[in-house]
Each structure stands twice: as structure tokens, then as C-alpha cells.
Image: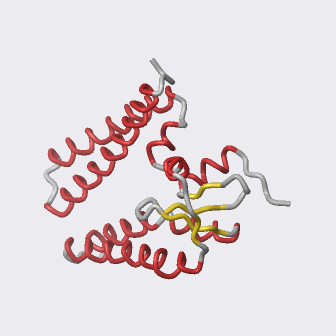
Amino acid sequence: MAKRYSDEDLATLASLGILVDKRNRLIFIDRILKNGYQLQPVDLKFFRYFSLRHVVALSFYVVGFSIWQINWLLALAAALLVWLLAEIYLRLIFLKKKPLQSLKEEEIKAVSLVSLQKKQPDIKLKRKIMAYSLLGTVTLILAFFAGYELPYLVTMIGFTVYIWGYVTIMVMARWAKRADGEIQ
């Protein structure tokens, strides 16, 4: 008998880009190429580690220019290389071994970043928008007034852009909820 997933498990899987279809199969949806790949439950461990690729790349950047004292552009290049190698491994090695699945448009939308945020309660979504907006604004203001050197300033601006990108996704989800009549 196939494992049944709880709502919490389904939300976690969706955040990794994995959908559980009607036959209880795990389908990874490549958000860039819009392809689906059938996975086995043992592949979930790989995807949990793979989801940390951004953190690992960011760590390479921060450690490179702050601890090892190398040029910040070189540290940025190393971080981008780590991220790129992880993406290449996923797309050209790991997913090539997995069977391709046909997808419907609503299945692709089910794991989009906006639809994941849209599933959250409205009050939680509003609080997250306010908290992240405040964090992004304060980070940017402090970065300029702290008189950082250029590498640190670029890092803080990059962090702020990332935060505001996340805020934009949450705002889009809230607008979608309003358009669907879920909130007033």
C-alpha cells in the first residue's frame, strides 16, 4: 500500500516543487522548463539537501570575502559557480534518470511560489508581508548609514533585493486571494 501524505507533508513537498498526483506518485515539477519527473520516496532526501543550494552558495560568498579576505567579485563568482554546478547536476544528471511525466497547467500552478503563499491564512500572509517589508527597509537603511565598504554594501543590497522579491510574491498571492473573492 502506498503512503498517504498529510496536508503538512504535501505543503512541504510543494515547497520543494514536488506534487503528489492522483495515483499517489511523487512528481517533481521543473518550474523553469515546465517538465514533470516521477520520483521515488528515497529521492526526497536528495531534494531536501538540494533545496539548500542557495544557502550553500551564499555561504561560499560570505566566507570567501569576509573570512578568507579574497576579492568580493571572486567570492561572488565562486558562489555562482557552486549554485550553477548544483543546477547542472540536477538537470543533466539526476533528472535524466527519472521518467518524464506529462503535466496539466493546474498541476504546474499548484507548486508555483504564488500559489504556495496563497494557501496560507490571510492574517499570517499580512503579518509576513509587514515583517519582511520592515526587514527589507531597515536592512537597506542601515546598510547606507553604516558606511560599509563596497563589498558589504553590495551584499546588503543583494539581500534587500531578495527580501523584496519575496515580499512581491506574497503581495501577488494576497492580490490573487482578493481576486478570487477569498478575502475582502
Q: Nearer the viewer, residue 65 or 58?
A: 58
Residue 49 is situated, as x and y percent measured from the top left of the image, at 55, 68
Q: Is 181 situated above or below 26?
A: above
Quadrant placement of the C terminus: top left
Residue at (67, 50) in percent of width and height: 9
Give x and y (percent) for residue 180.
47, 27
Which residue is drawn at the image coordinates 21% and 71% (left, top)?
72
Q: Quadrant of the N terminus?
A: bottom right
To which quarter of the image does residue 66 belong?
A: bottom left
Residue 83 position (above or below residue 7): below
**Is residue 90 shown left or right of residue 64?**
right
Is 64 rendered above or below residue 175? below
Residue 175, percent across and down?
A: 39, 30
In-image side of 88 versus 134 (left or right): right
Residue 115, percent from left and from top? 49, 42
* Residue at position x 69%, y 61% in the image: 25
For residue 69, which quarter of the picture?
Answer: bottom left
What colour scheme has been applied to the protein in the rendered image? secondary structure
Above or below residue 119? Residue 108 is below
Q: Is residue 8 left or right of residue 103?
A: right
Number of numbered discs present?
0
- Determine the residue located farthest toward the right in the rendered image: 1
Q: Is residue 127 left or right of residue 36?
A: left
